[in-house]
Image: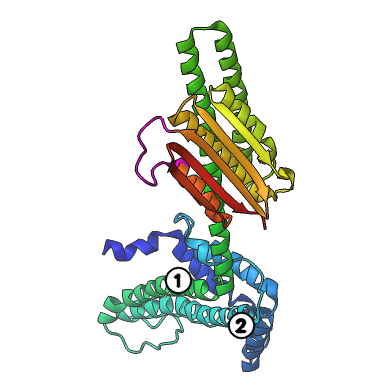
Amino acid sequence: MVRMLRPLTRAVTYKRWLHMAVATVWPSLWLFIEEAWWTQVTAAVLLGLAGLVPVTRVVEGFQARLLLTDHRQEGESAEIVTTPSATWADRGRTVVWLEARLVLGWIVAHLSFQLPLLAVDLLSTGLGHEPAADGFVTVEENHWWHAVLAPVPMILGLMAVVWSGHFVTALAERLLGPSPAERMAALEERTDQLLERTRIARELHDSIGHALTVAVVQAGAARAAGDTEFTDRALSAIEETGRAALEDLERVLGVLRESGKPVSSRPTLADADRLLDSARASGAKVDAEVSGPVDTVPGPVSREGYRILQEALTNVLRHAGGVPAQVRVLVTDGTLVLSIRNPLTAPVPGPGRGSGLRGIRERAALLGGRARTGPDEGDWQVHVELPLG
């Protein structure tokens, strides 16, 4: 019983009733001026013509969101759009919505007025009086049981308001909801947002992970060395790497704050010297060789190549420490080749372990390239080939 009465305590129930009643206001005024059947036909025709105007869908969408949805329930209005009609199918659905809203509004408004009048008539005749109102149902004679039936029309009226409110809301979601093309566009936008978040998370992992690895390695080496000069160099390396990481963090946070702003100023292979110097300052003996026109590498490939190189050097410092590392960057025949080798100083982990290696393979795959990571003749090798076209 309480569950059945709960809709009557919700404001959205009466907002929906108001939404349906408003649809009949101007046809009713016209009917009072000229009481003829053709006035209602003309009103229906004018509504149909109005539905063909693209902006009508915007107006109806805003009204439906404001009056038909329960704003306490987050996301309920997501199925009602507020964009102009883009196709004739959208216009057709808007026309059907306007006509259905008019018909449903007439029915609900009529019942909302006539059912209370019927209840008054039943109560009056049940008490031995003459009918007090002129309703659509004539109550004749006087019977005591009319008073017992008096609440029934009121209950039916309330039920009509609740049920018609649910029906008109479902109809709005159907006729004013997104078209298949709009759903596809929204899905693509959502997919792009998820891919962007994944890319940002990967960049944070690469940049912050590299900075923390350098800081840990440098701090440990400085403590073990006990040399003031070496400690000064270590602190300088930590400061430089931390400052670069903060710049990356600020840039990524700026992208998150302004989601519509394109990503820019990301480091490329032209900034690879910063990575190499940071690795050398951390104790790794890096032998680097760069061949080919690195400056001509397309932006997306160059930026992802920088991150791959950063992750590979981070893994060297994290897992091998200050060991000799060979870095080869080669641009030739429409391909960017990155090769990083270092001696193995620990047992090889199971295949595919480590988020860093997965990130390298994912970056290569997204660009249509390939990556090989694993032991090779006593060394650990990361070999990546990325197409330039």
For residue 345: magenta? yes
Q: Which mark is residue 92?
A: 2
Mark toward the start of the polypeptide (1 vs 2): 2
Residue range highlighted in magenta: 344-356
Does residue 210 appear to the left or right of 355 in the view shown?
right
- The reply to whether residue 267 is in sight is no
Question: Where is residue 80, by image quadrant?
Answer: bottom right
- x and y percentages locating residue 72 in the rendered image: 46, 54
Residue 18 on image: x %, y %: 53, 68
Foreground: disc 1 or disc 2: 2
Q: Is residue 160 visible?
A: yes
Q: The N terminus is located in which quarter?
A: bottom left
Q: Residues within 10 Å of mark 1 (few under 14, many from 20)?
A: many
Q: State the quadrant of the C terminus.
A: bottom right
Q: CA distance from mark 1 to mark 2?
A: 23 Å
Q: What type is the residue that disc 1 sits on?
A: Gly
Compared to residue 241, the image places residue 116 above or below, namely: below
Foreground of the two, 275 or 189: 275
From the viewer's perspective, is residue 14 above or below residue 149? above
Structural crowding at the residue carrying mark 2, measured as other residues with C-alpha within 10 Å and reported as few (<14), some (14–19) or many (≥20)? some
Q: Indicate the secondary structure of the residue bearing disc 1.
A: helix
Residue 143 shown in magenta: no
- Residue at mark 1: 165
Nearer to me, 69 or 343: 343
Look at the image and name its color scheme. Answer: rainbow
Q: Tell me the quarter of the picture where residue 281 sits.
A: top right
